[in-house]
Amino acid sequence: MDPREAYASAAELEAALGATGYLSSPELSTVAWLSLRLSRPLLMEGEPGTGKTALAEALAQALDLPLVRLQCYEGIDATQALYDWDFPRQILHLRAVEATAREGSGPDLDQIEGQLFDERFLLARPILKALRDAPVVLLIDEIDRADDEFEAFLLEVLSTWQVTIPELGTVSASTPPVVVLTSNRTRELHDALKRRCLYHWLEHPGLERELEIVAVRAPEVPAALAEQVVRATHAIRAEENLLKPPGIAETLDWARALTELGARELDVENAAATLGVAVKYREDAERVRLALNRMLTR
């Protein structure tokens, strides 16, 4: 199926995302639908834990397409994103050729070189895999962790939907992949990359929407407990100077953890005992622990 023709409207896409368990907003559904129709990458920025990566996963389910993920990190280069050669298998092949040559029937040097850089020894990394297997959903996660050179390389690929392998030639996508880039905004991305993409800033959800998310993603959590956890999470996010406020994933994990412990309500005692599920920095945990009584009595 051509992703551009999968859904006739943003409302249809929003309903399809909801069927996967991802509750989208009309604004997010609209920009996601436009990225499909226009074959443009979607750049999602926002705080960690707001559902940026989950959107790509939900899109893959809604479109019934494979998800190919490229996790960015400091120092990543084109080799890690594109392809590599399977050196152990190439060495085994050379040894087999040597054994044949000793019997007097081996190939000449040019033939050996051609065999070494054959398709069977090629290890496709995420971007090459996405181009070869398209249509797919290509998730380029945390692009802000990569450096300027990688960003420039990525911009070229997103502009042409093709890459060149010197030993094999040019690989082009028959259908442009559905591309979702995520950024936690640890650094500013270059304007050239942003111009190539459609853009959406994803906020933490409001109280009612987060309650809906917990009900859909963690239906085993009692409704009263879910509401207390969501309210507590929002109170924690409102605290000033936290290193990392809890995201939606932490809300879900906290609610599930309390349910596993058999809690029917969130009180100061069980909140303090399970705080490490929601807060992941010592300084944050100390600040929140001191404020738990105030948070839970609002």
Image: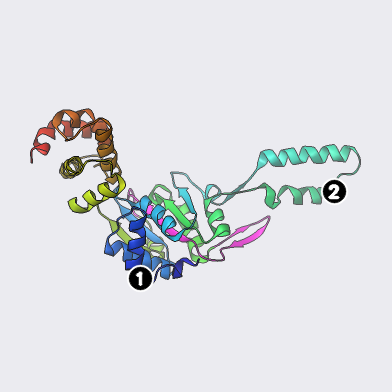
The number of discs equals 2
User: Does residue 175 show up?
Assistant: yes
Depth order, front residue of 57/246: 57
Q: What's the distance in space between the residues labelled 1 and 2, CA to CA?
A: 60 Å
Question: SS of the residue at dot 2?
Answer: loop
* Residue at mark 2: 108
Residue 55: x %, y % from top left: 36, 54
Question: SS of the residue at dot 1?
Answer: loop
Left or right of 214? Residue 169 is right
179 is within the stretch colored magenta: yes
Left or right of 93? Residue 283 is left
Q: Quadrant of residue 29?
A: bottom left
Left or right of 220? Residue 80 is right
Q: Which mark is on residue 233? A: none
Residue 151: x %, y % from top left: 45, 55
- Mark 1: which amino acid? Ser
User: Does residue 280 show up?
Assistant: no
Residue drawn at x 48%, y 62% as measured from the top left: 158
Q: Which residues are magenta?
A: 162-188
158 is within the stretch colored magenta: no
Crowd around label 2: few <14 · some 14–19 · many ≥20 (10 Å): few
Q: Quadrant of residue 14?
A: bottom left
- Mark 2: which amino acid? Asp
Quadrant (top left, top right, bottom left, bottom right) of the C terminus: top left
* Residue at mark 1: 9
Crowd around label 1: few <14 · some 14–19 · many ≥20 (10 Å): some
Residue 209: x %, y % from top left: 22, 53
Residue drawn at x 40%, y 66% as measured from the top left: 35
Looking at the picture, does residue 186 appear above or below residue 193? above
Residue drawn at x 78%, y 37% as measured from the top left: 95
Residue drawn at x 49%, y 61% as measured from the top left: 177
Residue 106: x %, y % from top left: 86, 44
